[in-house]
């Protein structure tokens, strides 16, 4: 009986561990995920390319407005302020998602501040 309990415990632990494990492919969104990785590494030019590829292929996709926002942030990080400003303004005008619209408005205000 004790060996049955050990076996049952081991089996339940294995099931629990496998159900909690996150598989990378479950959270992989192609060009968007690659762009995010480049952005996080500070490789903004490569991030812009991948985000733009994602947007071109998924203009109405769930992540499109987020990708546009990070294209703008990438341009700003590269010192391309006018390009960033245009993209933020377009996000605000389109009002696709209230959260990203508000974030874009905040970034526009930040760009208006005098740089130190």
Image: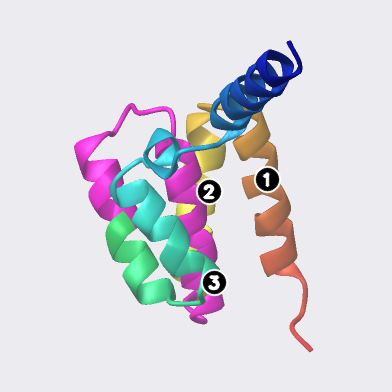
Q: Nearer the viewer, residue 114 or 99?
A: 99
Q: Which residue is mark 3?
A: 76
Instruction: Please report the residue visible at 40 percent of the width from the left and 37 percent of the height from the top.
Output: 64
Secondary structure beneath dot 2 equals helix
**Label for residue 103?**
1
Q: Does residue 71 show up magenta in the picture?
A: yes
Instruction: Please report the residue visible at 43 percent of the width from the left and 28 percent of the height from the top.
Output: 62
Q: Does residue 79 show up magenta in the picture?
A: yes
In the rendering, at what x and y percent does residue 110 appear? 73, 64
The overriding secondary structure of the stretch rendered in magenta is helix
Question: Is the C-beta separation of discs 1 and 2 under 8 Å?
Answer: no
Instruction: Give the label, 2 or 3, closer to the camera.
Output: 3
Q: Where 39 sits versus 104, above or below?
A: below
For label 2, the crowd category at 10 Å Cα-Cα, with few meaning under 14, some 14 to 19 and many 20 or more, is some
**Label for residue 89?**
2
Residue range in magenta is: 51-80
Which quarter of the image is occupied by the N terminus?
A: top right
In the rendering, at what x and y percent does residue 50 appear? 30, 58
């Amino acid at each position: 009986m004790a060996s049955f309990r050990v076996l049952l415990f081991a089996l339940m632990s294995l099931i629990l561990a496998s159900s909690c494990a996150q598989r990378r492919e479950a959270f992989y969104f192609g060009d968007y995920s690659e762009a995010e990785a480049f952005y996080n590494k500070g490789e903004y030019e490569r991030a812009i390319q991948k985000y733009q590829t994602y947007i071109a292929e998924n203009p109405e996709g769930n992540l499109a407005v987020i990708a546009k926002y990070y294209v703008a942030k990438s341009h700003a990080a590269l010192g391309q302020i006018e390009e960033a400003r245009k993209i933020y303004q377009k996000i605000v005008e389109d009002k696709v998602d209230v959260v990203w619209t508000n974030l874009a408005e905040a970034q526009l205000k930040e760009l208006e501040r005098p740089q130190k």
